[in-house]
Image: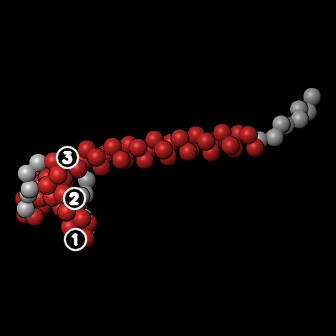
Amino acid sequence: MQKIEFSREEKAEIVSRIRAYFDRELDPIGTLPAEFLLDFFTEEIGPYFYNQGLRDAQAALLKRMEDVAEDIHLLEREQKSSV
């Protein structure tokens, strides 16, 4: 699996949200500790979310493929028998 990485802008936004959460719900946290926390979640917990996203995408794709197969079946025309 590829390493989960964020752009500089995404990382800044996520760190800002972590800091806001800590300000609101816990004790204030600095930028560096928030970045460390983000790195921890990205490495340790991120794969769980990533894998669940893959499973969700696969389920959605399989559902759509079933719908397409059903649509194709509905397009079939009755064949006349030669008897």
CA–CA distance in space, label 1 to label 2? 14 Å
Q: Which mark is residue 45?
A: 3
Q: For this rendering, which residue is in front, 45 or 34?
A: 34
Q: Amino acid at mark 3?
A: Ile
Mark 1 and mark 2 lie on one chain; the one further toward the N terminus is 1
CA–CA distance in space, label 3 to label 1? 20 Å
Using the rendered image of the protein, determine whether residue 39 is visible from the camera's viewpoint: no
Task: Point out the residue furthest to the bottom here.
Answer: 8
Q: Nearer the viewer, mark 1 or mark 2?
A: 2
- Callout 3: SS: helix
Instruction: Identify residue for label 1.
Output: 8
Q: Nearer the viewer, mark 2 or mark 3?
A: 2
Q: Are marks 1 and 2 in contact (CB under 8 Å)?
A: no
Instruction: Identify residue for label 2.
Output: 17
Q: For this rendering, which residue is in front, 7 or 28?
A: 28
CA–CA distance in space, label 2 to label 3? 17 Å
* Picture layout, residue 29 above or below residue 74: below
Task: Point out the residue furthest to the front here.
Answer: 24
- Callout 1: SS: helix
Rendered image quadrant of residue 8: bottom left
Q: Amino acid at mark 2?
A: Arg
Pointer 1 local density, CA inside 10 Å: few below 14, some 14–19, many at least 20: few
Q: For this rendering, which residue is in front, 80 or 42?
A: 42
Q: Position of residue 55 (x, y in %)?
A: 38, 43
Q: Position of residue 76 (x, y in %)?
A: 77, 41
User: Which residue is at a point 24% across and 65% down the rendered structure image?
Assistant: 13
Q: Position of residue 58 (x, y in %)?
A: 43, 45
Query: Is 53 placed left or right of 65 in the picture?
Result: left
